[in-house]
């Protein structure tokens, strides 16, 4: 077993519980001992762009401090928003003067720096690897046509991009390794509208409609996301007339392929099997 | 007499060492009609803030539980203004959204931990805010069980959260919807309704004062 520190984030403990259970089960099957950070706090949801009000940066850095206290060097997130905030904060405090001033708020503790923040997608690509992923797949996706949707925070801003921001491929490769058919589509790196879901539902609806039409236009049977907030927006903020495209979290595909239960994926894969047999 | 100098609301007094802040204020001539309750550390009415000479930190504590120190600068907080929206418990659901809908300022928490440092009960206050944010109502109830609602965290919070009102709602939701029912309570309520204790109660109500005093003196006392 390989241990890894794990930052769940609020969404995965509340509205998006279903995204967590199967994913962690699948990672355990892949040989990871998941160590949830004790007493973690909200990542902050968005990275604060304010440079001088350092208290806004204390929250994410406090989580990195807790990882340091666990004597782990990396921390895994399942949420793209948490990844963005934590990874950018880790970088922000690489500056010793900023770190010194933020540590004054963390008194009596002090963060030393150096914790690396990774997302489920990068774990699968860089540590598990596509080949092992394919080899460990117990229930292939039967060629299910899946449209990988990256959204924005995994790819922007550029220094924190987990893949080529203009032409990402990691999620397509993961889908293929699990036995699915990746369906790239033009809107896959567009923002879903994120937290505007609270104050400007109209903006989010317009974007969600565009994303789902684009994916359906490419012939997808389902959309796969890396973020509970994208997941929420793409399901709950659909304008009238949007194609009825199921949305899945990346970990759900992983969980099902590794042998965990996931009713959402199960019904889709069953349907894919039927349609591919019909083609034969 | 061993005395120390304290500054109450900015004015210096010599008071006997070893007094609590509350007793020192009374020794100095203050008559406390607000910001003073049980004097035993339970009611949370006597929140006080102070600084020590040569120390940058602002401390908070209960005046009835804290001994004066030489050079202490003290201010009493007789009341903490805090917003508590009206709600009907029977119309609420025990979910995280309920807490956030009634107390949206929870989402302003920056995890600075100032609340935890302010707590005279040594509670993990920030952890409770974080538990509230992720909808962990039993977690909030457990973490805040010993809260005395003194309001010190609320006075210090840069996110302007009304902590003790959030905790009260979380504990109410937890008690009403998330903890197992206690069948013996319902059974006892039925017994009370059916008049099981009526005879005994009527006897006491009708008893003259001398009889009551004698009965009180002869009562069974739990060991």
Image (cartoon, coloured by chain):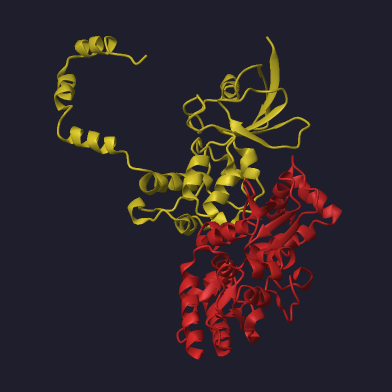
Chain colours: A red, B yellow
Q: Quadrant of the C terminus of chain B?
A: top left
Identified at 59% across, 67% down, the residue is A254
Tell me where residue B193 appears, x and y as whole percent. 17, 36
Identified at 79% across, 70% down, the residue is A159
Tell me where residue A56 appears, x and y as whole percent. 70, 56
Task: Please state the total of marks drawn on the protein image.
Answer: 0
Q: Quadrant of the N terminus of chain B?
A: top right
Left or right of B180 on screen, residue A110: right
Note whether B141 is above or below B204 in the view shown: below
Note whether B179 is above or below A221 in the view shown: above
Rendered image quadrant of residue B199: top left
| Residue at the limit of the structure toward the front, as seen here | A280
Residue B70 visible in this rendered orientation of the protein: yes
Note whether B108 is above or below B180 in the view shown: below
Tell me where residue B189 appears, x and y as whole percent. 23, 36
Tell me where residue A50 appears, x and y as whole percent. 74, 63
Residue A47 visible in this rendered orientation of the protein: no
Identified at 80% across, 54% down, the residue is A114
Q: Between residues B169 and B138, which one lies in front from this camera angle?
A: B138
């Amino acid at each position: 077993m390989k241990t890894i520190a794990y930052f769940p984030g609020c969404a995965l403990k509340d509205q998006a519980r279903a995204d967590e259970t199967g994913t962690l089960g699948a990672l355990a099957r892949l040989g990871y001992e998941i160590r949830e950070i004790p007493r973690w706090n909200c990542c902050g949801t968005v990275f604060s762009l304010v440079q001088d009000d350092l208290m806004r940066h204390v929250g994410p850095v406090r989580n990195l401090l807790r990882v340091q206290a666990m004597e782990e060097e990396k921390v895994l997130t399942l949420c793209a928003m948490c990844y963005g905030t934590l990874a950018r904060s880790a970088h922000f405090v690489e500056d010793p003067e900023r770190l010194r001033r933020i540590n004054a708020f963390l008194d009596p503790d002090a963060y030393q720096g150096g914790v690396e923040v990774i997302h489920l997608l990068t774990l699968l690509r860089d540590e598990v690897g596509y080949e092992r992923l394919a080899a460990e797949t117990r229930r292939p996706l039967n060629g299910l046509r899946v449209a990988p949707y990256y959204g924005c925070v995994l790819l922007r801003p550029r220094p924190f991009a987990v893949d080529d921001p203009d032409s990402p491929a990691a999620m397509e490769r993961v889908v293929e390794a699990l036995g699915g058919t990746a369906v790239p589509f033009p809107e896959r790196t567009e923002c879903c509208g994120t937290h505007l879901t609270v104050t400007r539902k109209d903006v989010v609806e317009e974007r969600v409609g565009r994303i789902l039409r684009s994916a359906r236009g490419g012939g997808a049977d389902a959309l796969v996301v890396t973020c509970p907030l994208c997941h929420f927006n793409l399901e709950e903020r659909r304008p009238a007339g949007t194609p009825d495209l199921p949305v899945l979290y990346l970990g759900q595909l992983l969980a099902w392929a590794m042998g965990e239960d996931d009713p959402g994926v199960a019904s889709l894969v069953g349907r894919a099997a039927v349609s591919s047999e019909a083609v034969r | 007499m061993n005395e120390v100098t304290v500054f109450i609301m900015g004015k210096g007094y010599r008071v006997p060492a070893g007094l609590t802040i509350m007793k020192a204020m009374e020794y100095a001539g203050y008559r406390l009609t607000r910001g003073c309750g049980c004097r035993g550390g339970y009611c949370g009415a006597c929140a006080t803030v102070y600084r020590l000479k040569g120390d940058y930190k602002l401390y908070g504590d209960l005046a009835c539980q804290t001994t004066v120190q030489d050079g202490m600068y003290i201010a009493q907080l007789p009341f903490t203004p805090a917003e508590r929206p009206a709600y009907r418990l029977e119309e609420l659901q025990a979910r995280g959204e309920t807490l956030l809908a009634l107390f949206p300022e929870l989402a302003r928490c920056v995890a600075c931990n100032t609340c935890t440092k302010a707590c005279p009960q040594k509670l993990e206050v920030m952890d409770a805010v974080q538990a509230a944010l992720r909808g962990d109502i039993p977690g909030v109830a457990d973490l805040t069980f010993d809260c005395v609602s003194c309001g010190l965290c609320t006075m210090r919070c840069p996110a302007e959260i009304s902590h003790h009102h959030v905790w009260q709602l979380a504990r109410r939701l937890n008690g009403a919807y998330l903890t197992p029912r206690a069948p013996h309570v319902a059974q006892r309520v039925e017994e009370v309704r059916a008049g099981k204790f009526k005879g005994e109660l009527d006897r006491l109500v009708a008893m003259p004062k001398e009889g009551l005093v004698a009965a009180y003196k002869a009562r069974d006392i739990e060991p």
